Amino acid sequence: MSQSATPANQAPHQAQAAAYRRPRTQQRTLTLPKTAKVAQEPLELDSSALFQGSREVHIRHKDMVYRLSITRFEKLLLTK
């Protein structure tokens, strides 16, 4: 004799299944602050174009002058 599925027979099973269900989580959307800027790729200069055959260039930044030079080991050296 088989039992038919009645609401009375399903209630314990549904209660057990509900205990194993994951709780629903609310999906949140995060936004960037309005002051945030998208990062840009840095400007890339070829040293030969910058030095134009010389071994030293002067770079003015605000009220200071910096000296960028190529060392004898072909490294760049920035000094005040």
Image: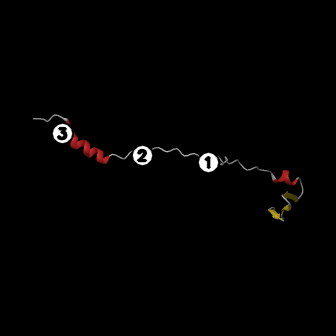
Q: Which residue is mark 3?
A: 9
Amino acid type at circle 3 is Asn
Q: Position of residue 8 (x, y in %)?
A: 18, 38
Furthest toward the left, the residue is: 1
Residue 75 drawn above or below residue 32: below
Amino acid type at circle 2 is Thr
Return the residue nearer the eye: 55 or 58. Answer: 58
Furthest toward the front, the residue is: 34
Amino acid type at circle 1 is Pro
Q: Are marks 3 and 1 in contact (CB under 8 Å)?
A: no
Q: How many residues crowd around disc 3 within 10 Å: few (fewer than 14), some, or many (20 or more)?
A: few
Q: Position of residue 38 (x, y in %)?
A: 67, 46
Q: Position of residue 43 (x, y in %)?
A: 76, 49
Image quadrant where residue 2 sits = top left
Separation (CA) of disc 3 from disc 1? 54 Å
Q: Secondary structure at mark 2?
A: loop
Q: Which residue sits at x=82%, y=54%?
A: 47
In this image, 63 relative to 4: left or right?
right
Q: Position of residue 54 (x, y in %)?
A: 90, 57
In this image, 73 relative to 31: left or right?
right
Q: Secondary structure at mark 1?
A: loop
Residue 25 is marked as: 2
